[in-house]
Image (cartoon, rainbow, N blue to C red):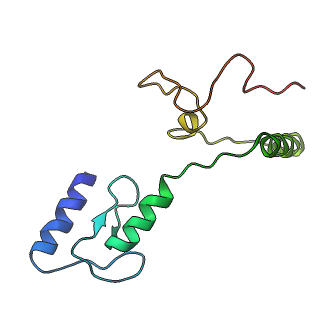
Amino acid sequence: SCRGCEEAARLQISRGNIPRCTQCGLRDAGGRVDERQTRNFYCSKCWAAYEGDRLVEYFDSAPEIDAKCLQLAEMIASARYVIAFTGAGVSTGAGIADFRSGRNTVLPTGPGLWERPK
């Protein structure tokens, strides 16, 4: 399990075998393993930057969203095939209620909000 990654790193550190940071290569006994995604070891400094960047959500203004929707519609219309990758984190970041809590987490939703007239 991923929990085992952190435990394995802590065991190695307790034995004096401090892993190298995946990003900068430095050895730091205070570093951490990313148990949620990469399973890589990061020193304290790189972890702080990595964790901070990874969880930031960005929101576009209404005009930016309109322009991007038009661009996407043109790309879809001109494509021979279209594949959409969706899943964990996509819906809740967009304000669509997740299946666990059933609550809207970010944006107000209502009929037609995610539809664009032809």
| In the image, farthest residue toward the bottom | 26
91 vs 117, left or right, is: left
Q: Nearer the viewer, residue 60 or 10?
A: 60
Q: In front here: 37 or 24?
A: 24
The answer to whether residue 12 is above or below residue 25 is above
- Furthest toward the left, the residue is 15
Q: Left or right: where does residue 51 sit relative to residue 33?
A: right
x, y percent for residue 114: 72, 27
Q: Residue at x 40, y 72 (%)?
A: 46
Picture coordinates of residue 19, whole percent (x, y): 25, 77
Q: Which quadrant would residue 15 be assigned to in this image?
A: bottom left
Question: Left or right of 48: which side holds 54?
Answer: right
The residue drawn where x is 82% and y is 27% is: 116
Decide: is 101 above or below 7.
above
| Residue at position x 71%, y 16% in the image | 111
| Residue lying furthest top | 111
Q: Quadrant of residue 23?
A: bottom left
Quadrant position of the C terminus in the picture: top right
Q: Is residue 83 left or right of residue 10?
A: right
Q: Residue at x 37, y 73 (%)?
A: 45
Q: Position of residue 70 (x, y in %)?
A: 86, 41
Q: Residue 104 location, x and y as percent?
A: 53, 25
